[in-house]
Image: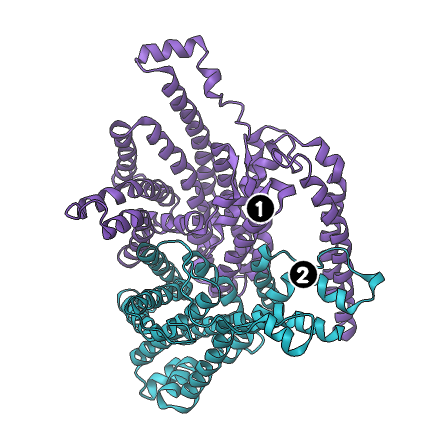
């Protein structure tokens, strides 16, 4: 961990930028950027563990973020009793049958001697399992989804504190990562990339379509807040808060929204610092040295008796868990789960830009990249139309070219991010804060 | 008679659409596999290269429409296709110059190429949305059907109709022509042979005096042509939307890997395999079984294995199975 002048300056600069937004635009916007910056930093920390420590190329970040979001619904929402009565047990049965089918198929494949018999047995197991699964699943899903579809129509969650969902989100993501890594690791690096791309699409497709699970594209709204974060209306009635507002000379309504964001920022900072501390400790330990040795020369590390594939599996699962935690935090902050908004450009490729720009292999770099790129992503959106306005001022209002350019300005940020990624990769491949 | 009806039903909803979709995937996978064979990386920008080529073709098509040029019963887009290919070829050559050539020179690891292609993907994505917008665009004109369902019913007296869209027939015909031309080029011409030599063994090819930069340029041009043709055919058959083209990346990669990365024949087989599985698994077989089974066995549900929302899961499942059991692909590609 090199706390040198340059790095302090870089972090000071980015927080200065956010503060400038607070002064010029509004503090509410500034804290919104800060909160999402903290979450982005955590995501890029997770990707950096995979890429920077081990050279693993994960393009499925979106899926792990979405799983974290799913965890908040499953943990924090109140259960829908009628739905459980209508088809809850049957649905659980269906899921168990599905899992057992796969396990049985695996057993058949491993235990039986290769040959036609094994193929037939495997086919029979899979077909019988699938038929039973569908027989249980279809009525259960229909029954659950027909219970008051406008407001529930799903099983709901466990009605627990939403903070519990954060580690649970990490666990869900870790499970999915384990399945992908188990199949794709040990092969060429491109294969892991394509497999993660696929699993992410599938996770999001499941979350969009399985309404009994999370209401799909109908969204789950009103996810409870962490117990430490009050609602704005409650806080506006507290005498100490009104005193503070009058003391600061602002109106209580806007101050309450900033206050809530500030509390979230504090929570996120704690999580980020804890995970950063653990990551730094791990990197310094013999385990971290081994990881870097494997990354730099797999053949040599293998010759020294290190199990490369197992270590890769380990770090891949850990990194994905961090991304899952960040995903749960994101959904908690939003207060709603909207599966339709998970798109790979925002939740996978943007995170990659953060890691590459910040400095792959260096945790501080990844965090800096998270803040910086998130800041640019938000501000370029606002700047794009302004620039277009400036460049097309000589065209009259209502000119089709001008209209088109103004409308398309929002897409400029995709282009900007691509250019930044390529420039950094080419001219400063070690990023802003390089690995020591 | 019922058996015939059942077969026609299947042909109409599974075989014909899957043939067309498979041809589009095969052309896309051929581009990916060629880049992989020669430049040795998985090009994540391929989907957006397809989108770019299609966009140029659409713009030229609109220009032709405004001038009153049309291709009669065929879609005007076919006339515009050469312009699209030319523009895309220029684009990929420019990206090669600006981006990839540097990493070739420093002999970067393949994964660095992949990340660079990610950056290129972002930029193309931005350019396409900037120019034509993120919405659906339809640019099909000309005769819509080769055979309509009603004509078919009239002709054969069957209860089920078989409709063949012009675009579906065109897709298959063009794909066959392109593949024949490509294989003739790879196997019969000197340049094609030098490409295969380079792909098989780079050092040996260099020793025998093959100019690597020339091979690379030709590969990019061919890949651009394949991508544009695949993109335009897909757009004609369905519709053009930038995000859909990005999503095509998964089935295309699945097709290329199933066939064995770097193996052109495998890419074609992989394309049809992925397309047929996707369509067959997501089709609702209720009516099909109604024809074949006696009345008392009539199925209750839709008899659909997977809802169409999960079609990506099919390519993914195929991909995982191949990776688990035969990582080099069915046709023994070069990668492990």
Indicate which disc residue A419 carries.
Answer: none
Q: What element carries label 2?
A: loop
The relative height of residue B172 versus residue A110 in the rendered view (above or below) is below
Q: Nearer the viewer, residue A185 or A193?
A: A193
Q: Nearer the viewer, residue B325 or A79?
A: A79
Residue position for label 1: A207
- Asked which quadrant contains residue B276, the reply is bottom right
Residue A50 coordinates in the image, percent (x, y): 47, 52
Q: Nearer the viewer, residue B41 or B221?
A: B221
Which subunit holds the residue at mark 2?
B
Mark 1 nearby-residue class (10 Å; few <14, some 14–19, many ≥20): many
Q: Which of A210 and A167 is in front in this view?
A: A210
The relative height of residue A188 versus residue A242 in the rendered view (above or below) is below
Q: In this structure image, what is the colour of chain A?
A: purple
Of discs 2 and 1, which sits in the foreground?
2
Q: Do dots 2 and 1 share one subunit? A: no
- Residue lying furthest right in this view? B296
- Asked which quadrant contains residue A266, the reply is top left
Residue B299 coordinates in the image, percent (x, y): 77, 59
Mark 2 nearby-residue class (10 Å; few <14, some 14–19, many ≥20): some
- Residue lying furthest left in this view? A394
The relative height of residue A211 versus residue B176 in the rendered view (above or below) is above
- Asked which quadrant contains residue B55, the reply is bottom left
Q: In this structure image, what is the colour of chain B?
A: cyan
Q: Which residue is drawn at 55% across and 55% down?
A: A199
Indicate which disc residue B284 carries.
Answer: 2
């Amino acid at each position: 961990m090199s706390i040198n002048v340059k790095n302090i300056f870089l972090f000071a600069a980015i927080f200065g930028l956010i503060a400038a937004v607070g002064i010029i635009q509004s503090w509410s916007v500034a804290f919104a950027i800060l909160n999402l910056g903290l979450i982005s930093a955590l995501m890029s920390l997770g990707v950096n563990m995979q890429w920077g420590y081990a050279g693993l190329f994960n393009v499925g970040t979106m899926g792990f973020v979405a799983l974290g979001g799913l965890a908040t619904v499953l943990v924090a929402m109140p259960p829908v009793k009628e739905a459980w009565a209508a088809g809850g047990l049957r649905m659980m049965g269906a899921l168990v049958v599905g899992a057992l089918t796969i396990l049985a198929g695996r057993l058949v494949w491993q235990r039986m001697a290769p040959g036609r018999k094994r193929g037939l047995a495997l086919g029979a197991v899979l077909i019988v399992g699938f038929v039973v699964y569908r027989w249980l699943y279809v009525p259960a899903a229909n029954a659950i989804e027909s219970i008051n579809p406008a407001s529930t129509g799903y099983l709901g969650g466990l009605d627990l504190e939403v903070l519990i969902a954060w580690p649970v989100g990490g666990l869900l993501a870790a499970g999915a990562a384990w399945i992908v890594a188990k199949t794709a690791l040990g092969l060429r690096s491109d294969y892991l990339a394509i497999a993660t791309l696929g699993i992410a699409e599938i996770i999001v497709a499941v979350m969009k379509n399985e309404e009994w699970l999370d209401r799909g594209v109908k969204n789950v709204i009103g996810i409870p807040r962490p117990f430490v974060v009050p609602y704005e209306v409650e806080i506006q009635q507290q005498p100490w808060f009104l005193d503070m507002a009058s003391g600061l000379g602002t109106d209580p309504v806007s101050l309450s929204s900033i206050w809530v964001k500030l509390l979230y920022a504090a929570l996120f900072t704690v999580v980020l610092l804890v995970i950063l501390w653990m990551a730094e400790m791990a990197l310094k330990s013999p385990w971290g040295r081994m990881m870097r040795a494997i990354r730099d020369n797999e053949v040599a590390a293998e010759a020294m008796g290190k199990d490369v594939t197992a270590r890769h599996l380990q770090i891949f699962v850990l990194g994905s868990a961090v991304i899952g935690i960040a995903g749960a935090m994101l959904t908690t902050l939003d207060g709603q789960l909207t599966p339709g908004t998970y798109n790979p450009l925002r939740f996978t490729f943007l995170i990659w830009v953060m890691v590459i720009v910040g400095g792959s292999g260096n945790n501080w770099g990844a965090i800096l990249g998270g803040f910086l790129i998130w800041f640019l992503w938000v501000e370029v959106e606002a700047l794009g139309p302004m620039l277009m306005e400036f460049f097309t001022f000589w065209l009259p209002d209502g000119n089709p070219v001008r209209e088109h350019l103004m409308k398309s300005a929002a897409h400029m940020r995709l282009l900007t991010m691509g250019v930044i990624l390529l420039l950094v990769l080419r001219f400063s491949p070690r990023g802003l804060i390089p690995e020591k | 008679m019922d058996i015939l009806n059942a077969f026609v039903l299947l042909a109409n909803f599974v075989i014909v659409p899957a043939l067309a979709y498979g041809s589009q995937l095969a052309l896309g996978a051929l581009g990916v596999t060629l880049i992989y064979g020669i430049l040795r990386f998985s090009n994540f920008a391929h989907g957006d290269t397809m989108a770019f080529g299609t966009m140029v073709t659409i713009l030229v098509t609109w220009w032709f429409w405004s001038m009153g040029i049309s291709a009669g019963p065929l879609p005007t887009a076919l006339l515009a296709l050469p312009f699209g290919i030319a523009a895309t070829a220029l684009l990929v050559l420019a990206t090669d110059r600006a981006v990839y050539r540097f990493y070739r020179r420093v002999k970067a690891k393949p994964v660095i190429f992949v990340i660079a292609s990610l950056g290129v993907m972002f930029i193309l994505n931005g350019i396409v949305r900037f120019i034509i917008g993120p919405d659906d665009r339809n640019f099909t004109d000309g005769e819509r059907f080769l055979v309509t369902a009603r004509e078919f019913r009239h002709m054969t007296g069957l209860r089920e109709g078989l409709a063949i869209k012009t675009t579906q027939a065109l897709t298959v015909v063009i794909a066959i022509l392109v593949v024949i031309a490509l294989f003739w080029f790879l196997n019969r011409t000197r340049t094609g042979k030098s490409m295969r030599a380079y792909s098989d063994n780079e050092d040996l090819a260099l020793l025998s005096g093959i100019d690597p930069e020339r091979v690379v340029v030709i590969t990019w041009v061919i890949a651009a042509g394949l991508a544009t043709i695949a993109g335009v055919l897909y757009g004609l058959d369905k519709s053009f939307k930038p995000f859909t083209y990005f999503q095509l990346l998964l089935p295309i990669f699945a097709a290329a890997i199933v066939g064995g990365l770097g193996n052109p024949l495998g890419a074609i087989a992989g394309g049809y395999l992925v397309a047929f599985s996707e369509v067959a698994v997501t089709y609702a077989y209720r009516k099909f079984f109604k024809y074949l089974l006696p009345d008392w066995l009539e199925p209750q549900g839709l008899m659909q294995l997977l809802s169409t929302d999960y079609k990506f899961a099919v390519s993914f499942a195929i991909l995982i199975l191949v990776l688990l059991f035969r990582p080099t692909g069915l046709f023994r590609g070069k990668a492990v």
